[in-house]
Image (spheres, rainbow, N blue to C red):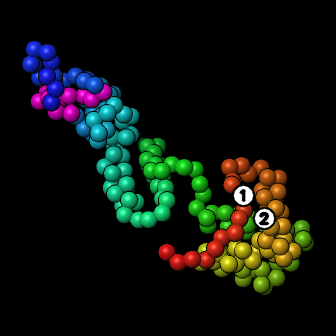
């Protein structure tokens, strides 16, 4: 609660970046006037932040319970509201496997590699069970046995196809969470 110089309670107004309610407390997670909203901390925010505030708080609490670096992105497909936590742009490691699969099939179609049973089995395991070693082996296959050459080949292929925003192909290690 805040008092003016006459000792009167500030109400229904902004004070030092916060909106004070009729009883002088800080308004939280609500609309305070026409199309003006405050978040869970009482600061002015966009309407969608109020709608997603409780979910964000719950997700943040969940993420904080795990070690490592986590990012969360949620989009309401009906309203377009977006919530993100630790919004550093990155693809999950397994998404890159789709691009490797594309490069493998393109190489097979150009007869650069043989799409034999072994390659098809590696593709199947890489995609269906997200097998990291199969990913590594397919990259080596595209590099004629060299992982580094396979990375270079795939990165050039992706650039030629017009893909942007991909950080590049690199080795994925097997580990348990």
Q: Which disc, if any, is residue 151?
A: 2
Q: Secondary structure at mark 2?
A: helix
123 or 10, nearer to the observer: 10
| Apparent side of residue 112 relative to residue 46 in the rendered image (left or right) | right
The residue drawn where x is 78% and y is 58% is 155
Q: Position of residue 69 (x, y in %)?
A: 49, 59
Q: Position of residue 127 (x, y in %)?
A: 64, 73
Identify the magenta region.
17-26
Marked residue nearer the N-terminal end (2 or 1): 2
Q: Secondary structure at mark 1?
A: loop
Q: Position of residue 122 (x, y in %)?
A: 72, 80
Instruction: Give the labeled residue for mark 1.
Output: 168
User: Is there any visible trace of residue 52 in the rendered image?
Assistant: yes
Choose top left, top right, bottom left or bottom right for residue 45. Answer: top left
User: Is there any visible trace of residue 33 in the rendered image?
Assistant: no
2 and 1 marks in contact (CB < 8 Å): yes
Q: How many marks?
A: 2
Q: Determine whether 79 is above or below 140 in the image.
A: above
Q: Determine whether 121 is above or below 53 in the image.
A: below
Q: Position of residue 27 (x, y in %)?
A: 22, 34
The residue drawn where x is 71% and y is 49% is 164
Q: Residues within 10 Å of mark 2 (few under 14, many from 20)?
A: many
Choose top left, top right, bottom left or bottom right for residue 174. Answer: bottom right
Quadrant where the image shows the N terminus: top left
Whole-number angstrom distance, CA of label 2 to CA of label 1: 8 Å
Q: Residues within 10 Å of mark 1 (few under 14, many from 20)?
A: some
The residue drawn where x is 82% and y is 53% is 160
- Residue 112 in the magenta stretch? The answer is no
């Amino acid at each position: 609660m805040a008092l003016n110089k006459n000792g009167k309670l500030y109400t229904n107004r902004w004070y030092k970046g916060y909106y004070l309610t009729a009883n002088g407390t800080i308004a939280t997670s609500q609309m305070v006037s026409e199309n003006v909203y405050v978040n869970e901390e009482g600061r002015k925010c966009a309407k969608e932040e109020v709608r997603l505030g409780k979910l964000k708080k719950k997700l943040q609490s969940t993420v904080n319970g795990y070690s490592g670096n986590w990012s969360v992105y949620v989009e309401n497909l009906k309203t377009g509201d977006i919530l993100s936590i630790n919004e550093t742009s990155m693809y999950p490691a397994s998404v890159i496997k789709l691009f490797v699969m594309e490069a493998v099939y393109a190489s097979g179609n150009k007869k650069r590699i043989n799409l034999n049973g072994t390659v098809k089995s590696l593709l199947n395991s890489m995609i269906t069970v997200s097998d990291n070693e199969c990913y590594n082996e397919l990259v080596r296959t595209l590099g004629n046995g060299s992982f580094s050459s396979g990375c270079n080949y795939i990165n050039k292929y992706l650039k030629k196809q017009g893909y942007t925003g991909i950080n590049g192909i690199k080795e994925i290690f097997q580990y348990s969470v």
